[in-house]
Image: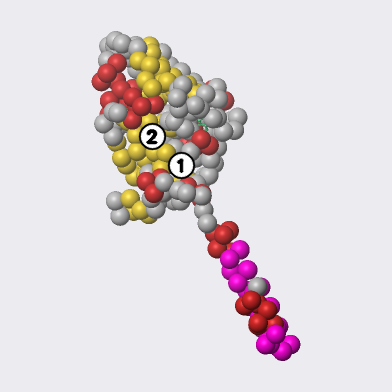
Amino acid sequence: MKCTGEYFAWGGLPDRIILSGLIIIIMFVCGCVEQQQAPAVNVSDKEDLFFEGRKLTPIEEQRNNAIKGTQFINKETYTLQVTGMVNRSLNLSYEELLAFPVADRFLRMNCVEGWGFDARWTGVTLNSIFNDSGLKPGAKNVIFYCADGYSTSLELDYLTGNDIMLAYRLNNVTLPPERGFPLQLVAEGRYGYKWAKWITHIEVTDQPYEGFWESRGYSNTAKVGERAFGIF
Ligand SMILES: Nc1nc2c(c(=O)[nH]1)N[C@H]1C(S)=C(S)[C@@H](COP(=O)(O)O)O[C@H]1N2
Ligand SMILES: [Mo]
């Protein structure tokens, strides 16, 4: 250690203090730099914070809600079943879902608890899926069954008329597991409890249906701005 030895031989006590100080500062700075190094991120997986000129709520600031916590679904083995009053039942893989025409929209999600957030939603419309499956005359409702046992339903006319989508990307990143990977229903204009996550099965029916929260007293229409529970 020629260099260090020379410094120590040359320096008096104040120099040593200054040198030690410098070394500590350098170590500290190096430590900081090292801590700031994030794991390699895929640039295409970087979250969008603006979309079509509008500000998005960062995912970190978006709340989430689930009756049984996060479900972890294996992309390789996952399929979305489409059954009931369709001409042809479907069993769509994740790759097949991504291959449909892409819907991409700015929309707000509002939970009945009073919180909400603005996000960019990207996915496949139910119209695209029903275009493949066909729909039998007389079909009225669509039930969404989820991996955690949750379920909810919506009127077929609302879903087709508003070109409602199943999202697989949120703020332009793959839907995170806690947010419903692989699919969350983007129930525009309806309360959060209609935004089913971890959807595994869609059933088309002519029967009325009450989902998890609906069978516990929450409104089955769940329109944002309308009363969602009891008389309040
Ligand atoms: N499968 C499943 N989907 C669900 C729920 C749930 O418990 N399980 N909670 C609903 C409720 S009450 C809300 S407010 C939204 C919250 O969506 P987020 O977690 O993406 O913010 O998810 C909805 N979808
Ligand atoms: Mo909710």
Residue indicated by mark 1: 110
> Label 2, on which residue?
167
The verdict on residue 25 being magenta is yes
Residue shown at 68% from the left, 79% from the top: 5
Span highlighted in magenta in the image:
9-31
* Beta carbon of the mark 2 residue lies under 8 A of ligand 1: no
Q: Where is 140 relative to 18, above or below? A: above
Q: Is residue 51 above or below residue 95?
A: below
Crowd tier of the residue under label 1, counting other residues whose Cα lies within 10 Å: few below 14, some 14–19, many 20 or above: many
**Quick one: label 2 or label 1, which is nearer the N terminus?**
1
Judge from the rendering whether residue 218 lies leftward or rightward of residue 23; answer left or right: left
Horizontal side of residue 13 vs 178, given as left or right = right
Q: Nearer the viewer, residue 221 or 205?
A: 205
Q: Quadrant of residue 81?
A: top left
Q: Is 60 rendered above or below residue 221?
A: below
Rounded to the nearest angstrom, the CA distance separating label 2 from label 1 is 16 Å
Please name whichever residue, 23 or 84, is drawn nearer the observer in this view of the structure: 23
| Most distant residue in the front direction | 2
Q: Position of residue 156 (x, y in %)?
A: 33, 22
